[in-house]
Image (cartoon, grey):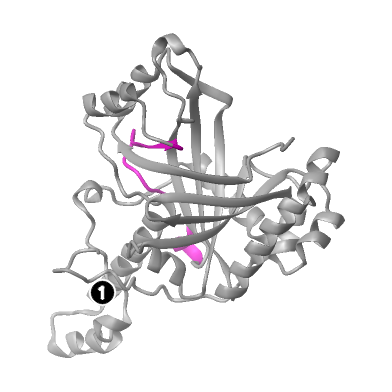
Amino acid sequence: MATFTDVFERKEIKYRLSARQHAAMLASLAGIMVPDEFGCTDVVSLYFDTPERTLIDRSLEKPLYKEKLRLRSYGMPRESDRVFVEIKKKYDGIVYKRRVGMSYAAARAYLGGMPYGMACAQHPLPDPVMAAESLSDRSVQIAREIDRFMLQHRPLRASMLVACKRTAYVSIDAPELGCEANGLRVTFDADIAYRDQFASGPSAAPRLLLREGEVVMEAKSSGPFPRWFAQALAACHAYPSSFSKYGEAYRACAAGEHDSALTSAEARVDGGRAAVGEASRAHPPAQRRPVRPTPSPAHAASPARPAPRAAQSALEEAGECLSAGARDTRHRRFRAPNHAMKKGNRCA
């Protein structure tokens, strides 16, 4: 029997909730769904991308098909803890996820270039069942798919670290409450913070993505949502939101570098024409410098805020920890998203 689910095919819909909406949804779940066995969990994901970040750039253009590669850990991993290397694909609104579980030491070796089987054999999981599962035919096949992904998009680099506190709710399977069996799973992500792995110095400091009290709720189901859940969404006026943690962090980085560029330019302007000309020469035409994507109304009042000190420390440690096997020390200038200036100065 598998110790974890390695393949997913389901519908995933996200909702950005205020503190009030969050409380209302929790009240609606009471008696129908309960937190799963893990309770509140720290979820740390390290996303990989090309040096130009073409994967996330394309993803934000909302194509029919898109894919991502990430290393995911539940909590701060030790060498022998199990982590997951995942390919997440989305086609026509359906999410497909393929992942392999291995020790953190094996994942570092694998992402650093060692063949999957060799990495798992040299750094096995302590649990014999889990260790055998890492080298099962099914896992080896999924690893081949990940290998093809990495070969197709090489070179890949650790791009963005995202962490959050997640509480997952599952049905208590009480037929008398009228719960349809569509495998509904509801997660709430709070304290979402990110760290740009391409940045250095102060710009690399962890920052929060949401306003205080906000959470991202994700409803995951293999079929239609139960009626009671749809009614709960309507009652608190919760509507689907296209919210990608990596995507929003990417936009925040673009906006932050754009602000820094503007600040540098303004500092050089002393009121004289010569100074203005110097600033113009220092900042070439728009296609060569980052342009702030115009945020949608749902995100307009959400400037990236510094993460609390405890979260900063944890995220910095996670950044060093998870990216140790795939670190690229070359500094790169952030490239503006291709979709930033479309359709009347709005994000596509």
Task: Say whether residue 114 is left or right of residue 20.
Answer: right
Task: Say whether residue 176 is left or right of residue 83.
Answer: left
The percent position of residue 266, horizontal first and vertical second, equals 22, 74
Is 117 placed above or below 99 here? below
Residue nearest the viewer, comparing 70 with 320: 70
The quadrant where residue 253 appears: bottom left
Mark 1 nearby-residue class (10 Å; few <14, some 14–19, many ≥20)? few
Q: Quadrant of the N terminus?
A: top right
Residue drawn at the location 49% of the way across and 66% of the way down: 199
Q: Is residue 304 magenta?
A: no
Is 239 placed above or below 178 here? below
Residue drawn at the location 60% of the way across and 47% of the way down: 7
- Residue 313 visible somewhere in the drawing: no
The percent position of residue 144, horizontal first and vertical second, equals 69, 63
The amino acid type of the residue labelled 1 equals Ala
The percent position of residue 148, horizontal first and vertical second, equals 63, 69
Residue nearest the viewer, comparing 287 with 167: 167
Q: Secondary structure at mark 1?
A: helix
Q: Quadrant of the C terminus?
A: bottom left
Q: Is residue 214 magenta?
A: yes
The residue that disc 1 covers is 267
The quadrant where residue 267 appears: bottom left
The percent position of residue 213, horizontal first and vertical second, equals 34, 33
The magenta-colored residue range is 200-222
Residue nearest the viewer, comparing 307 with 39: 39
Residue nearest the viewer, comparing 82 with 4: 4
Residue drawn at the location 63% of the way across and 51% of the way down: 99
Task: Say whether residue 127 is left or right of residue 18.
Answer: right
